[in-house]
Image (cartoon, rainbow, N blue to C red):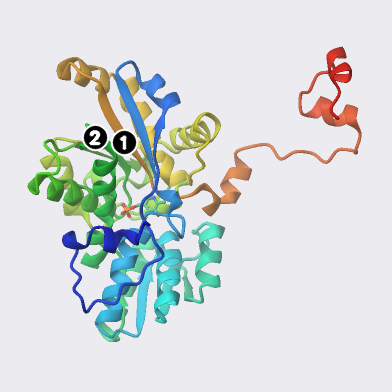
Amino acid sequence: MWRGVIETYRPYLPVSSKTPIVTLLEGNTPLIHSQALSKRVGRHVDVYLKYEGMNPTGSFKDRGMTLAISKALESKSDAVLCASTGNTSASASAYAARAGLRSIVLIPSGAIALGKLSQALIHGARIASVEANFDACLALVKSLAQMHPVTLVNSINPHRIEGQKTCAFEICDALGRAPDFHITPVGNAGNITAQWKGYQEYYRRGHIRRLPVMVGFQAEGAAPLVKGNIITHPRTIATAIRIGNPASWQGAIAAREESHGLIQTVRDKEILEAYRLLAMEDGVFVEPASAASVAGLLKLSRSGYFHSKRIRAKRTLSIVCILTGHGLKDPERAIKSIRLPKPLPPSLSAISKAVGLLRRSSVSSRGTS
Ligand SMILES: *Cc1c(COP(=O)(O)O)cnc(C)c1O
């Protein structure tokens, strides 16, 4: 039976027999082979989707939160605090509820998806909706954490990074090696930092013989790492990566440099195309930010990046795209990107016409009973 990421990867994590483990059995998420994307990228390429939306609160944040909340409990903290674009608050409030800790959340007012807000509310978080963006909320919680005996559970908390490493472990365990390319959306940059740390640790312990190339994608209007400076007013429809001053800036740059990787941008239009493609061709529903990895995959593929790498490698390449969060987090976006069906009278002919079921003589003769 799966026992959550802490029990599964205990030797790699800073826990002892005295640590009370708070878990919702996070991790063990599916690594799904995508025939549709493999075909789009070209011959001799295998694209896999690591569907982190399948974690208990619907995003990868749970991997870090199980450890951050366990350590907060161990250190006798009585409340946890975070700034959030949505998923951190959803995860923190769920794990805090389970641990019997209070959770306090600062969110940028009007800028988080409804599904995520409902999660924090139902788990009983104290929510301050602040008239400022995420970066300003993060600065505020840092000050609050210095003034009060509460534990900050944003990804500047090193336990978050430690827990999130386990995503890389699972990918290597599933493939039997590291992928050639690891592609991930980048916001506050904790995740790319954690994943690279995970691969490096598996490499040092001899579980893998090669390291992947780390590839990060930011939204064009929120791309401080690509532009090389803080973005004061980050803009993108992908709220989870609408961040102008990433806390793990150095970690992301190190991952890129040490792995000979890339951090590039994708436009919102490309994110939404990838979002629809994943849903329509792979049956995988993600939130917009998550689709940035696949948008980036397709952008690199169009530029010939993988083709030239494959020629040099002389073998089939494996690519893993991280799908960071579930599509149900942001139902408003899904509804905005399709046409809502008009109400119809309960008539067979009207319904058949609307759903494209053409009348055929064989239908009636075959019968349905
Ligand atoms: C948090 C989050 C991100 C960004 O991860 P960082 O560690 O901040 O770079 C991307 N997608 C989703 C769904 C998230 O919740």
Disc 1 target residue = 320
Counting residues from the start of the chain, the first of labels 1 and 2 encountered is 2
Residue 249, compared with residue 100, is above or below; it is above
Query: Of 120 and 166, which appears nearest the observer?
Result: 166
Image-quadrant location for residue 68: bottom left
Q: Residue at x 35, y 47 (%)?
A: 222
User: For numbered disc 2, what is the local secondary structure?
Assistant: loop
- Identified at 37% across, 27% down, the residue is 298
Q: Position of residue 194 (x, y in %)?
A: 23, 53
Look at the numbered discs 1 and 2 and tell me whether their residues touch, using CB distance below 8 Å: yes
| The one of 127 and 103 positioned closer to us in this rendering | 103
Identify which residue is drawn at 43% across, 25% down: 35
Instruction: Give amino acid for label 2.
Output: Pro
Q: Amino acid at mark 1?
A: Val
Measuring 71% from the left and 40% from the top, which residue is drawn there? 340
Where's the N terminus, which quadrant?
bottom left
Q: CA distance from mark 1 to mark 2?
A: 6 Å
Visible in this render: residue 85? no
User: With respect to residue 350, does 223 lie above or below?
Assistant: below
**Which residue lies under the disc numbered 2?**
179
Mark 1 burial class by Cα count in 10 Å: few <14, some 14-19, many 20+: many
| Residue 50 image offset from top left, x and y in percent | 37, 42
Q: Quadrant of residue 280?
A: top right
Q: Position of residue 154 (x, y in %)?
A: 31, 66
Quarter containing the C terminus: top right
Instruction: Report whether residue 74 is seen.
Output: yes
Residue 323, image quadrant: top left
